[in-house]
Image (cartoon, helix red, strand yellow):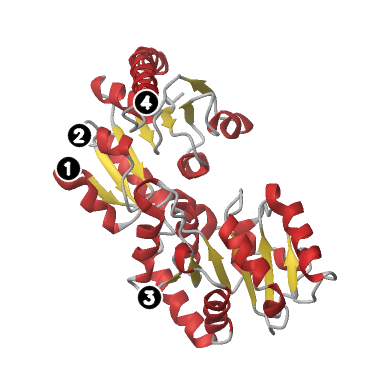
Amino acid sequence: MKKPLKIILSGGGTGGHIYPALALADRLKEINANVEFLYIGTERGLESKVVRDTEIPFKSIKVEGFVRKLNKDGFLYNMKSVYYFINSLRKARKIIKEFQPDIVIGTGGYVCAPVLYQAAKLQIPTIIHEQNSVAGITNKFLARYVDKIAICFEEAADEFKKYISKVVYTGNPRAQEVANVKADNALSDLGLDPNKTSVIIFGGSRGAYEINQAFIKSYEILAKKPYQILFVPGSANYSSIINQLADLYGDYEKDNIFIEAYIDRMPQVFKEIDLVVSRSGATTLAELTALGLPSILIPSPNVTEDHQTKNARSLVNHNAAVMIQESDLTVDLFVEQIDSLMMNETARLEMANEAKKLGRPNASDDIIKLMLSLI
């Protein structure tokens, strides 16, 4: 029997680091049944639950990030992080030697540092995948050691100028996963009329306070619009949003407004929606461009190096999206920007076309080609 292709995946902390790795694994399994995976993450990160819900074996190492505080607490925390990092190097090396992978892929998060570093030292082919337009600290550290650096935004190449020969523009595996999803009456199942134009407003799985408040404050105005609004505040915020609407407006149920706490079939909804209003996380933008969707992006200002603004700007600079800075978010501007696209089909189609040009619907296949070239 032919020897299986053995791959270690590593990435942790947030869904933006985990789901691209899982999307890549799914695509690999589609085209090669004889492949074995091992995922290395942390027990503390989201990956410990998400990956364990799949069929991919999971092993954990303990590693923490560093803080920039210069006080006593910051110093002690960083000393503890150094201790964990040294231990994680030993454990990562042991796991890698036992599994004997053909290649190791890192998709971001502190856990990748010891895993990819040790793989490189063991002369195993390595790739890091940077989802954002601004490189994370771990990927910057690993850039000198790995064989290839896969990026999702052309602007990210500037983050790796010293290692530009390693950089390959592949896109995000989540893009290919979403591009291949079939429409399945998702809007009808949620109660919307599929024959009417519809906009979805959401802030991610946990919601976004400022976006939620903009929706609440503009509720009565939006209720009079000829288009449909699907609002997704996040499960943790749903009860609070409903109570606020009831307190402010009494009978808040409107024929053109639909509120869902959480949607687990978002790619199917995207297939049928006309406009997206959302944050500008890397995974969301990969999905929007893969499908060619017009969008109004409201970046979170509370992320490392303001990378969501830079992500959004990469689309705005190509007329593939509109951006509203959270500091500028008012009811008037919120409604005005939604109206400008929902009431103008030509503008929506032009923006959709520009977004599609930026899409990488074959991202997983391109990364797989890169992997095989190294192996």
Looking at the picture, does residue 225 appear above or below residue 179? below
Mark positioned earlier in the residue sequence (1 or 4): 4
Residue drawn at the location 65% of the way across and 64% of the way down: 183
Q: Of circles 3 and 1, which is in front?
A: 3
Kindly identify which numbered label has been placed on residue 148: none
Given contact means CB atoms under 8 Å apart, are the residues at marks 1 and 2 in contact? yes
Looking at the picture, does residue 310 appear above or below residue 101? below
Residue at image mark 2: 144
* SS for dot 4: helix
Q: Is residue 327 visible?
A: yes
Which amino acid, mark 3?
Answer: Asn
Residue drawn at the location 34% of the way across and 64% of the way down: 314
- Determine the CA span between mark 1 and mark 2: 7 Å
Mark positioned earlier in the residue sequence (2 or 3): 2
Front residue of 356 and 136:
136
Q: Quadrant of residue 244?
A: bottom right
Residue at image mark 4: 74
Residue at image mark 1: 163
- Determine the CA span between mark 3 and mark 4: 43 Å
Mark 3: give few (<14), some (14-19) or many (20+) Cα within 10 Å: some
* SS for dot 1: helix
Mark 1: give few (<14), some (14-19) or many (20+) Cα within 10 Å: some
Front residue of 258 and 360:
258
